[in-house]
Image (spheres, helix red, strand yellow):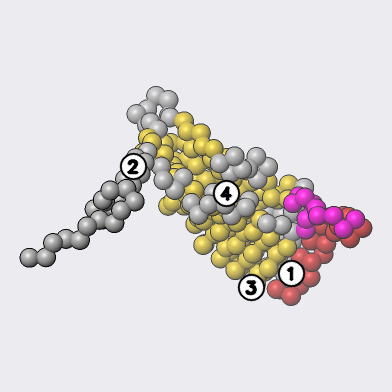
Amino acid sequence: MALSCTSARGWLLSALAAGAAAGLYAFAATGAVLPTHQLPITVDAASSEVDYRTNTVVFSQVVISQGATRIQADHAHASGLNFANSRWTFDGHVRIDAEPRGSLRSDQAVVEFRDNRIVRATASGKPAEFEQQRGDSQQMARGRAEEIVYDVSEGTVRLSSDAWLSDGVNEISGPLLVYNIRAQRVQAAAQPGTDQRVHITIQPQSAPAPAPAPAPGRPRGEPGKTPPPTPQS
């Protein structure tokens, strides 16, 4: 039995309320800022359809948010009608914003929810892409690979299959790269038994520019005296 968009939204509000009621009550009672896993999950979509026979839900032009984590895509379908334990597949112009100033872009992504929170996102594409602004600087860490796995609790991005990562100056590529978003640290591994190796490109540091030569001064006479005038011809 499939539900109309209006009916589905009614179901969705009930499901979200059940999953997030405890967290909302705690916030109202204490006024404290809740950790991300206790924040409610919100869904906004252009259209939606729920099929109770197959226990699936389908959305188009969907945006799912929890705290600073935000997922948007052209289409999404899920194997479960709640966020307690479900697996969602997003297709078409997928973008995942997470951690301070970080994002993933891909053709497709599979996102896992556990205990009403996002725990993992697996993005795939030709290629899938990742970027994060490094601290307070304007430099961007950027990466790409055919598969990128973002582990929310660990704060890591795992790039595999033709993986490439840049810190904004230097580059590293290989079959497997693991980037720690919080520590801004990368680990690389070669593929045993193959000719696939880790390649690092380090850009040379520019030498400091020499100090400008002092401008030529006036001829100096004896100390404390004005230089004599130049004779006229």
Give the tally of numbered discs. 4
Quarter of the picture containing the N terminus is bottom right
Q: In the rendering, at what x and y percent does residue 210 appear? A: 31, 45
Residue 154 picture quarter: top right
183 sits left or right of 34 in the view: left
Counting residues from the start of the chain, the first of labels 2 and 1 encountered is 1
Q: Earlier in the sequence, mark 1 or mark 4?
A: 1
Nearer to us in this view, 79 or 118:
118
Return the disc, 3 or 2, that comes first in the chain's sequence: 3
Q: Which residue is mark 3?
A: 46
**Residues in magenta, as a range:** 30-40
Task: Please state which amino acid type lies under the numbered disc 1.
Answer: Ala
The residue labelled by disc 4 is 135
Would you name the residue on which mark 1 appears? 8
Question: From the viewer's perspective, is 73 left or right of 12?
Answer: left
* Mark 3 vs 4, N-terminal side: 3
**Is 36 included in the stretch rendered in magenta?**
yes
Residue tagged by mark 2? Answer: 207
